[in-house]
Image: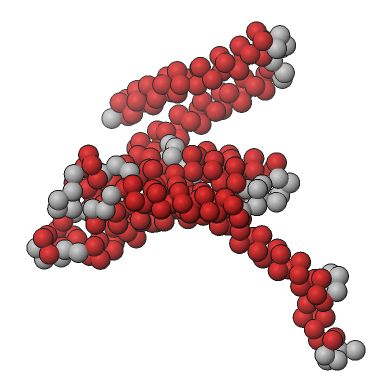
Amino acid sequence: MMQATLLQLFDLLAQTLFDVAPIAAILVGFQVGVLRQKVPQLRKVLVGSAYVVIGLTLFLFGLEKALFPLGKTMAKQLTDPAFISGGKALSSLVWSDYYWTYLFAFAIGFATTIAEPSLIAVSLKAQQVSGGAVGAWGLRLAVAFGVALSLAVGTFRIVTGTPLYLYMIAGYIVVVIQTLYTPRMIVPLAYDSGGVTTSTVTVPLVAALGLGLASTVPGRSPLLDGFGLIALASLFPMITVMGYAQIGAYVSQRKQRSKQKYGGGQDPLQAESTAEGLTP
């Protein structure tokens, strides 16, 4: 057992090296061949690259051994007709009988997105580039809420059998309208947020949930109805991130108006009390 685990770990290490090698070759090739300059701080680059490969290997190994099996097992159990029906005939089930599935989809979407490495990297860079105007945690929470909402809506779509294109058309209409009224600084970041969610952690669990649900709901086809959750998971974060920016801009504008109304940087409550003669 231990030997088989070690062999699997080394195979995954070799696969990670194979996947990372083209990136390293392109970076070194352009640095040396095109720019004709030495790689700065070569030793640190090599050590950091080794850390990246080892970290990715252990991360993927942990996902494969722990998170993926657990997520698939729970998705299978929650979509089991015996659990959902509670003794009723499957033909008599309605969309509201699948409430545990909606709740699980929301929770697993939020949790996996918070743990998504690509989102963590993007949020930290966004905070750094914006000088703190975009909070890393605020962005991560907004994206995670969007993915969670998308999975809940996506499981509802599978249960009800409504066409995917209706959700996509309605969602992108909302995105276009939001784009017109969202601070310009956040729009490109919001669009990119939809892409970073569909990465290592989220996709396998989302796919397992959609296929498992489509295979157990009467009248649904895993091929026609089981897919599409990932498309929604790319759409909804754009809506929630722009919504997060719009709420932040609205709150900021209200604070600014309050300061202007009650005079400079004085606290509004104190200024109001002074105006009414309640304080000396």
Q: Using the image as rendered, state which of residue 183 and residue 159 is in the foreground.
A: 183
Q: Could you tell me which residue is drawn at 39 percent across and 48 percent down?
A: 168
| Position of residue 186 in the picture relative to residue 204 (left or right) | right
Snapshot quadrant of residue 25 = top right
Q: Using the image as rendered, state which of residue 150 and residue 136 is in the foreground.
A: 150
- Estimate the x, y position of residue 43 in percent, counting from the top left: 67, 18
- Estimate the x, y position of residue 35 in percent, counting from the top left: 70, 12
Quarter of the figure that contains the C terminus = bottom right
Quarter of the figure that contains the N terminus = top left
Snapshot quadrant of residue 5 = top left
- Estimate the x, y position of residue 62 in percent, counting from the top left: 40, 37
Q: Could you tell me which residue is drawn at 50 percent across and 27 percent down?
A: 54
Total numbered labels: 0
| Position of residue 87 in the picture relative to residue 254 (left or right) | left
Relative to 42, is 183 above or below? below
Relative to 73, is 33 above or below? above
Relative to 196, is 181 above or below? below
Q: Is residue 71 visible?
A: no
Q: Could you tell me which residue is drawn at 82 percent across and 80 percent down?
A: 271
Check the image and name the residue furthest to the bottom.
Answer: 277
Check the image and name the residue furthest to the right.
Answer: 280
- Estimate the x, y position of residue 215 in percent, counting from the top left: 18, 46
Q: Is residue 246 visible?
A: yes
Q: Could you tell me which residue is drawn at 69 percent across and 15 percent down?
A: 39
